[in-house]
Amino acid sequence: MKIKWPQNKRLLLGIALLILVFGGLLLNPKAPAPGESDSLTLNGITVPPVPTLNPGQVAQGKQLYATYCSACHGANLEGQPNWKQRGADGKLPAPPHDSSGHTWHHADDLLLEIIANGGDPTISTMPAFKDTLSEAEMRAVLAFIKASWGRNEREFQWWVTASSGSR
């Protein structure tokens, strides 16, 4: 029996497609659904999956950030130039909040405390916002900042937050 080339071509294409689909399932049998991730383990400490950011909260945080934070920390979260070097007044310039900064190194509780009470006055000009923003608004600003980070920064910051008991 002689198979015509077009039929043979379709058969080969079908087999290749099946191999790709089932091969992908074998290589990654438990891929997380969109917005879902597996628990995270660093330094032998496992924490729950990284929470998904709420788009409404991120949008609110973006507006609040533009109003209260961008003058010092930059419209694109880029911070001030030479943010690691003290100025003539001995204070550090406002750091970036994107992945190039160090915000993602700290737990939520510390970041919220800094937003509420301001930075250490001996090295920072960061004002307190506890009389200006509600806790929910401060959390929205933080959600907006987190939305700018890459996956590695989000995972590390969540691990720091969850392993410290901060939420």
Image (cartoon, grey):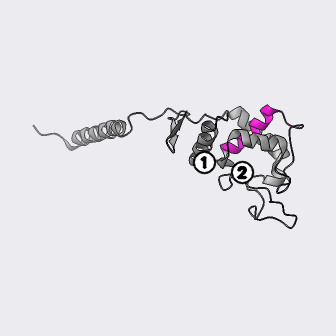
Left or right, 4 with reference to 88: left
Residue 86: percent from the left, percent from the top?
Answer: 80, 64
Residue 47: percent from the left, percent from the top?
Answer: 55, 35
Nearest the viewer among 15 and 121 is 121
Nearest the viewer among 148 and 111 is 111
Upstream in the sequence, badge 2 or badge 1?
Answer: 2
Q: Is residue 34 magenta?
A: no
Which of the labelled discs sits on residue 153, or is there none? 1
On-image quarter of the C terminus: top right
Q: Residues within 10 Å of mark 2 (few under 14, many from 20)?
A: many
Q: In the rendered structure, which segment of residues is drawn in magenta?
A: 129-147
Left or right, 107 with reference to 67: left
Total marks in image: 2
Splitting the image into 4 quarters, where does residue 30 fall?
Answer: top left
Tell me if I can see residue 72 in this picture: yes
Instruction: Identify the secondary structure beneath mark 2.
Output: loop
Instruction: Identify the secondary structure beneath mark 1.
Output: helix
Q: Residue at x 81, y 46 (%)?
A: 66
Q: CA distance from mark 2 to mark 1?
A: 11 Å
Residue assigned mark 2? 97
Residue type, mark 1 in image: Glu
Residue type, mark 2 in image: His
Residue found at the far left of this picture: 1
Q: Are marks 2 and 1 in contact (CB under 8 Å)?
A: no
